Each structure stands twice: as structure tokens, then as C-alpha cells.
């Protein structure tokens, strides 16, 4: 009984060890799932388990070895397997496996060895528990590099039963792609293309310079270039022309008084002498109008009676008109205009034909931006120019006297500080101001003042409180007190900062000075209340009006009507061409339409101080006059 029990225990231990070995083999066939693609390799080594019974009674520590017969038998089987499969496995592995896969195989080999050792240890434990027999697990690892493998681990893509379908398909695709690219012969095509490129590149060749002929005749040249005549005699040298110095387009006129010499007439003619005598005899002063303002209704009726005709339109100057003035005489209608060319044109509308009443003078070399008849002596006309000169034309003596001259500066505007026109305030384009006294000998200023403006476009004096004057800058309007002016650091009494764009002009109302009208490039006319000169001046009215004249037209400057100081006159860009009059409330009072006689824009306008006569100048030198 004891013998049968021992045999049964030995058989049971063998079955248990065989089950574990089978589980190990099945685990080797389980596909490894990874979240990212991992290269799968074919293991080139296989573990073989040999079970040998032995008795513990004859056990010695140094005798734990396998029987020689069993080892010889296993070795014979392995040699036979190697001989059968060696050639086929080498061919298949060389075609499919890559160096990276072989590296992975070595890693898998170490893992398999570790697993087999675990199985060996576990079987030893079970053998020690058994009282009769013990099983020894031996593992035989063979390298794939020597071509040793079992039939189940053959790495062929079609007959490799150990790989998954995906791995077999992948290896098949790799082989097909390799064969396809090999059939394209890309390396041979690239080599041929390189040879073609090298052949097409032309060899660098340096241009050979032609050798000079020492005794031969050179290229044929014309006799003109050789500077010889047909007979072979050399021509004389051409005299060099003297170099001309580049002169200024608008040279300054010589200082001192200039004679009144008309450019469009003969100064010795009897007609010109009669013209001078006519202007000299007109000595009616421009007395201040103390009458009450007429009603708007009667004012509109008088404006409606003013018309224009071909006889009241005439070309007076050569270039654009920048300033205009009407003589205060009530006997004759005399109009003066300052042009961009530096000319001053005078027109007597009582002369017929109209061309006989026009006389043009050249007292300046640059644009005449400001023009006034003297309030003390209407036979004097004062003109200011960009060239830095201020002259007074005296018709009784037929001369233009020089009042103020500064060649380093450019003047923009002026006005009379005193009622007798003895002192003047002059504005400069660089933002400075000059006080000039006509009674002082010489042509210099009395005081040079630096204002807080970068530029000054217009200067206008208060008609009642003549110590105040207003200046129009680039964006601001400043009011100064002439009694507090210092050479440096002058701050204005009042600043009007409501304007958003460039300012063209600013003028007090002509009788009381209670209003100020400004013209701005933001298409607005603004009227301020200056009845009280304080720190704050309220804005009364904003009139929407197109003031964008462009590059070639003179900028609009809204001015007051001397007879009706609550109305302003300004040019218009509307069609048909017109000159408009607005009330200080913003309502339009009248529009002067001339039809065919007024076919251009009158940018600069002026009204007679006592008569209903309106004169407007355009950018071609023409003057248009509306009168009863």
C-alpha cells in the first residue's frame, strides 16, 4: 500500500507541475496591449522543462545534477531540430527582423529567463513539501542568432503561429513596401539627376579683354567728336559759359521808399496822373457810425437791391487775392486787393471802360496777407507781406514808404492800436508780436513780444477798448492786454479753446466789440459774447458752414458788416456760387447770387463801411462787386 501511495503522489506532483508549465506557455501567447504602438519582436529562445525523479535518501548537496543519459537525449533532440530548421530560420529572420527588433528580443530574453527561474523555484518548493520525490526544473535557452528555435517560434510572417493577425499583417506590409520602393530605383534616379545637373552648369569662363593694337587704326569716330573739321584741321575750343548763380525766386525789394510805378500802365500818361489826383483828393475820413442798427427787415431789403454785372467784374491782380479793402469814400467806389504774387491792385469803378480804372503795383515780393486804408488819412493804404515788410502807399506823393522791416521774420497780420493810426500791432508767423510806432524814425519795432502761440494768423484790436486785441493761432484764440505785454512769458487774459481744428481768423464786431466771430476748419463759424472781458467768454452761436476750400483756394475768413455788426459775411462752396450773410443767431440773412457773372468762389470779402457795396476776391485775381 505504501508503494502504491508513493506512486500516486509522484504522479500527482508531475501533473501539477505540468499544469503550471502549460499555464506559463499560454501566458507567453497573450498579446500585450499598450496605449501607444510598441515594436513586437519574435523571441528567439524557448524554455524546455525536464522532470527527473530522485530519492532524498541518497541526496547530497553536490550531487544535484541531471542524469547524463537524459541530458544526452535532450541534446540529441536539439541537434536534430537545429539541423532541420537552421537554414530556413536564418533566411526568414534576415529578411524580416530589423536591428531594433533584435534589440527588443534581447530584452524579452532576459524577461523569459527570469520567468523560468520563478517556475524552477516554485517547483523546488513543492518538491520539498513532498516527502518522497522532488522535481528539478532545468531551462535551456538557445540564441536566435545561432538559428536555434522550435517549430512554434518560426518568425515567418505567414506560418508564425505565435504572432497576432495584426503583427503578421504589419510584417507583410513592411515587406511589400520595401519591395515597392526597391522597384522604383530611387537611388539610381537621384544619381542620374545629379549627373544631369552637373552637365548643365556652364563652366566659368572669364571674359577675355581685347588686346590693344599698337600700330593699327582704332574704332571709327565722327569728326564732330574728334573736334576737327572735314579738312582735318582741329576746331577752336568752345568758350565756357559763365556760371549763373542760383537766385531766389522772390528776392526782397530794396529797403526804403518805392515809387508808385504801375506795371500795367505808362507812368507818364495823363491818365495815371489823373488817377493819382483822384485818390489824393478823396480825404473823407471814416467817421465812426453812431446811428442805431437798422432792423433786419430793412437790412434784408437793402441787400436784395444789390446786383452784379459784367461791368463790376474785373481782373485786378496776377495771382490769388489774399486781402481786400474798400475805400470809405461815398463819392467814388475804390477797391484795393493784395495778391499772392506781392502785387497791390487798385480799381476805380467809376472809370469807363473798366480796364482804364485798374492799376497794379509791386510793393512786395511775397504774398500780401493784410490790407487796410488808414482811418486817419484815407489817401494812405497800408499793406503787409510775408517778406517781412510793412509799407504805406501815399497817393499824394506817389510813393510806397517803408514803415516796418524785419528780413529775419515773416509777417501775417496787423491792426491799428491807436485811432490816429500812429501805432500798430504786427503779428508774426512764428508766434511773436511787434509794437510799431510810425512817428519814430527808422523801420524797426518799439517792442518785440513773445506770445504763448506757436503761430499767429490774424490780429484785431477792440474798437472801443483799444488796449485789448485778439489773436488767432493754430487751435486757440487768445485775448491780450497791450498794457501788460513783456518781452518774454506773456500769458493771455482769455483763451478760447472750443476749436478742434485749424483756425483761419478771429475778429471783434466793428462798432461795440461785444461779439467775436471765428472761422475754423471744422466747418463751423463760432460767435462769442465779449461784452465783458473776463476769464470766461460764453459761446453764443455755432453756425454750420463748409470751410474746406482745398489747396488751390484761399481760406475763408468771416468778417463783420461795418454797418450791421450783428451780421457776418463769408464765402461759400455751394453751387451755384454765392456769398452768404448770417445773423449772430445763426440764421441766414441773404445770399448773393451772380449767375454767370459769379462763376467762382469768392474767398475774401469786404463791405463798404457806409454804402451797400460788397467786394469779393477769388483765387485768379478777379474782383466781383455787388452794389445798388
Image (cartoon, grey):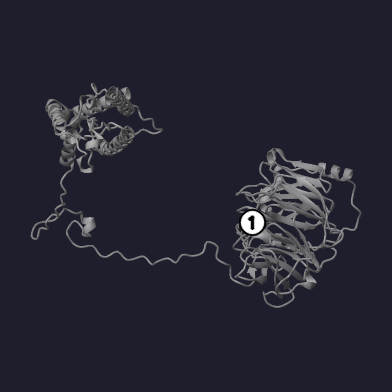
Image quadrant where residue 150 sits: top left
- Count residues near mark 1 (Cα–Cα under 10 Å), then give few for <14, some for 14-19, many for 20+: many
**Mark 1: which secondary structure?**
strand
Image quadrant where residue 423 sits: bottom right
Question: Is 503 left or right of 207, judged from the image as shown?
Answer: right
Above or below: residue 376 compared with residue 527: below
Residue at 34% in and 34% down: 129
Which sits in the foreground, 265 or 596? 596
Image quadrant where residue 514 sits: bottom right
Above or below: residue 220 compared with residue 180: below
Residue at 55% in and 65% down: 251
Which sits in the foreground, 265 or 304? 304
The quarter of the rendered structure image containing the N terminus is top left
Q: Position of residue 367 (x, y in %)?
A: 62, 59
Residue 398 makes an appearance in the image: no
Q: Position of residue 58 (x, y in %)?
A: 21, 37
Q: Which residue is mark 1?
A: 339
The quarter of the rendered structure image containing the C terminus is top right
Which sits in the foreground, 356 or 584? 584
Residue furthest out toward the bottom: 441
Question: Is 242 left or right of 200, judged from the image as shown?
Answer: right
Q: Position of residue 529 (x, y in %)?
A: 84, 55
Residue furthest out toward the left: 215
Q: Position of residue 464 (x, y in %)?
A: 85, 64
Residue 535 makes an appearance in the image: yes
Q: How many marks?
A: 1
Question: Is 567 left or right of 551, judged from the image as shown?
Answer: right
Amino acid at each position: 500500500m505504501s508503494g502504491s501511495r508513493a506512486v500516486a503522489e509522484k504522479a500527482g506532483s508531475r501533473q501539477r507541475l505540468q499544469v503550471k508549465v502549460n499555464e506559463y506557455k499560454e501566458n507567453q501567447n497573450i498579446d500585450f496591449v499598450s496605449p501607444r504602438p510598441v515594436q513586437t519582436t519574435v523571441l528567439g529562445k524557448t524554455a524546455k522543462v525536464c522532470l527527473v525523479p530522485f530519492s532524498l535518501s541518497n541526496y547530497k548537496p553536490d550531487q544535484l545534477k541531471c542524469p547524463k543519459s537524459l541530458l544526452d537525449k535532450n541534446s540529441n533532440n536539439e541537434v536534430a531540430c537545429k539541423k532541420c530548421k537552421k537554414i530556413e530560420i536564418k533566411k526568414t529572420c534576415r529578411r524580416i527582423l530589423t536591428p531594433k527588433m533584435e534589440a527588443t528580443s534581447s530584452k524579452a530574453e532576459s524577461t523569459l529567463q527570469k520567468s523560468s527561474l520563478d517556475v524552477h523555484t516554485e517547483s523546488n518548493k513543492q518538491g520539498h513539501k513532498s516527502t518522497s520525490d522532488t522535481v528539478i526544473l532545468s531551462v535551456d535557452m538557445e540564441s536566435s542568432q545561432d538559428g536555434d528555435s522550435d517549430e512554434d517560434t518560426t518568425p515567418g510572417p505567414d506560418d508564425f503561429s505565435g504572432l497576432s493577425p495584426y503583427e503578421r499583417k504589419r510584417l507583410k506590409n513592411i515587406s511589400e513596401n520595401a519591395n515597392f520602393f526597391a522597384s522604383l530605383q530611387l537611388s539610381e534616379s537621384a544619381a542620374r539627376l545629379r549627373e544631369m545637373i552637373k552637365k548643365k552648369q556652364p563652366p566659368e569662363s572669364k571674359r577675355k579683354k581685347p588686346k590693344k593694337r599698337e600700330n593699327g587704326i582704332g574704332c571709327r569716330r565722327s569728326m564732330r567728336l574728334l573736334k576737327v573739321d572735314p579738312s582735318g584741321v582741329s576746331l577752336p575750343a568752345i568758350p565756357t559759359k559763365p556760371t549763373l548763380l542760383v537766385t531766389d525766386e522772390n528776392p526782397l525789394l530794396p529797403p526804403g521808399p518805392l515809387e508808385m510805378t504801375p506795371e500795367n500802365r505808362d507812368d507818364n500818361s495823363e491818365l495815371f496822373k489823373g488817377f493819382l489826383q483822384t485818390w489824393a483828393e478823396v480825404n473823407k475820413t471814416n467817421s465812426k457810425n453812431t446811428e442805431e442798427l437798422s432792423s433786419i427787415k430793412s437790412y434784408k431789403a437793402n441787400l436784395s437791391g444789390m446786383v452784379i454785372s459784367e461791368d463790376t467784374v474785373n481782373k485786378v491782380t496776377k495771382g490769388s487775392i489774399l486781402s481786400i479793402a474798400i475805400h470809405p469814400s461815398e463819392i467814388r467806389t475804390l477797391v484795393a486787393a493784395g495778391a499772392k504774387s506781392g502785387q497791390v491792385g487798385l480799381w476805380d469803378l467809376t472809370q469807363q471802360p473798366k480796364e482804364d480804372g485798374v492799376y497794379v503795383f509791386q510793393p512786395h515780393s511775397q504774398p500780401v496777407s493784410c490790407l487796410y486804408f488808414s482811418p486817419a488819412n484815407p489817401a494812405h493804404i497800408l499793406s503787409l507781406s510775408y517778406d517781412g515788410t510793412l509799407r504805406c502807399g501815399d497817393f499824394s506823393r506817389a510813393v510806397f514808404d517803408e514803415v516796418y522791416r524785419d528780413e529775419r521774420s515773416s509777417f501775417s497780420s496787423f491792426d491799428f492800436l491807436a485811432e490816429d493810426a500812429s501805432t500798430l500791432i504786427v503779428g508774426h508767423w512764428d508766434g511773436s508780436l511787434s509794437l510799431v510806432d510810425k512817428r519814430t524814425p527808422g523801420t524797426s519795432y518799439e517792442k518785440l513780444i513773445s506770445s504763448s502761440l506757436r503761430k499767429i494768423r490774424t490780429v484785431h484790436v477792440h474798437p472801443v477798448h483799444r488796449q485789448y486785441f485778439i489773436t488767432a493761432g493754430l487751435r486757440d484764440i487768445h485775448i491780450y492786454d497791450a498794457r501788460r505785454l513783456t518781452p518774454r512769458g506773456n500769458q493771455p487774459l482769455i483763451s478760447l479753446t472750443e476749436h478742434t481744428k485749424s483756425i483761419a481768423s478771429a475778429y471783434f464786431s466793428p462798432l461795440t466789440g461785444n461779439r467775436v466771430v471765428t472761422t475754423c476748419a471744422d466747418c463751423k463759424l463760432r460767435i462769442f459774447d465779449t461784452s465783458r472781458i473776463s476769464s470766461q467768454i460764453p459761446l453764443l452761436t455755432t453756425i454750420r458752414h463748409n470751410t474746406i476750400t482745398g489747396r488751390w483756394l484761399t481760406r475763408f475768413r468771416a468778417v463783420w458788416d461795418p454797418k450791421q455788426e450783428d451780421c457776418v459775411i463769408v464765402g461759400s462752396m455751394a453751387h451755384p456760387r454765392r456769398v452768404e450773410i448770417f445773423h449772430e443767431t445763426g440764421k441766414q440773412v441773404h445770399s448773393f447770387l451772380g449767375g454767370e457773372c459769379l462763376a467762382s468762389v469768392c474767398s475774401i470779402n469786404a463791405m463798404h463801411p457806409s454804402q451797400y457795396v460788397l467786394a469779393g476776391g477769388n483765387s485768379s485775381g478777379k474782383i466781383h462787386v455787388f452794389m445798388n
